[in-house]
Amino acid sequence: MALFLLERLTPLPVEQAWLRLTDWPRHGDVVPLTRVTVPTPPPTGVGTVFVARTGIGPLAFEDPMEVTVWRPPALCRLEKRGGLVTGWAEIEVHPHGEGHSLVVWREDLAVHLLPALFDRQVGWAARWMFGRAVDGLLIRGPAVGGGV
């Protein structure tokens, strides 16, 4: 499995950063060739399931995730339950200075059929991709409704 950690300082207050990071469909706006659907009814909580479908046509795969820990606006843990990608992710949002936040994104993932020999490359690619996604979520306009 490939474990990686991202940290981002943002001028957003904790609640706004949390809303942006846990508005699951918005993830599809910042990850290329990805659409995110949430088949479980709102609001987000333990047991919420969402599915990221990435790719084009027959080259696409689904990455279903389930919320297993939900402590807004501080901690969310996701379990990846897909056939291709498995593992977990944790999103933490901490106060940092007056009105600002520190976001910590920790993830451990494995790609089915890819031997552990490639964990370093998977970690590098995932850190780059999720770093861009987190940056995009924190920079883009206000979250509406979010995941709270």
Image (tube, rainbow, N blue to C red):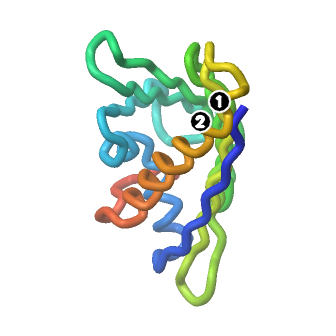
Tell me which corner region of the image, top left, top right, bottom left or bottom right, holds residue 2: top right
* 59 in relation to 110, above or below: above
- Relative horizontal placement of residue 19, taking residue 2 as reference (left or right): left
| Residue at x 36%, y 42% (from the top left corner) | 31
Q: Residues within 10 Å of mark 2 (few under 14, many from 20)?
A: many
Determine whether the residue tagged by mark 1 lies in a helix, strand or loop: helix
Question: In the rendered image, which residue does mark 1 sit on?
Answer: 118
Residue type marked 2 = Val
Q: Residue 90 placed where, x, y %?
A: 67, 47
Q: Residues within 10 Å of mark 1 (few under 14, many from 20)?
A: few
In this rendered view, identify the residue nearer to me: 12 or 71. Answer: 12
Q: Residue 138 placed where, x, y %?
A: 42, 64
Residue type marked 1 = Phe
| Residue at x 46%, y 75% (from the top left corner) | 12
* 10 in relation to 35, above or below: below
Determine whether the residue tagged by mark 2 lies in a helix, strand or loop: helix
Q: Residue 134 placed where, x, y %?
A: 47, 56
- For the N terminus, the image quarter is top right
| Residue at x 46%, y 46% (from the top left corner) | 129
Q: Farthest residue toward the bottom?
A: 98
Q: Are marks 1 and 2 in contact (CB under 8 Å)?
A: yes
- Relative horizontal placement of residue 148, taking residue 114 as reference (left or right): left
* 84 in relation to 51, above or below: above
Question: In the rendered image, which residue does mark 2 sit on?
Answer: 122
Residues under labels 1 and 2: Cα distance?
6 Å
In this rendered view, identify the residue nearer to me: 3 or 24. Answer: 3
| Residue at x 31%, y 10% (from the top left corner) | 58
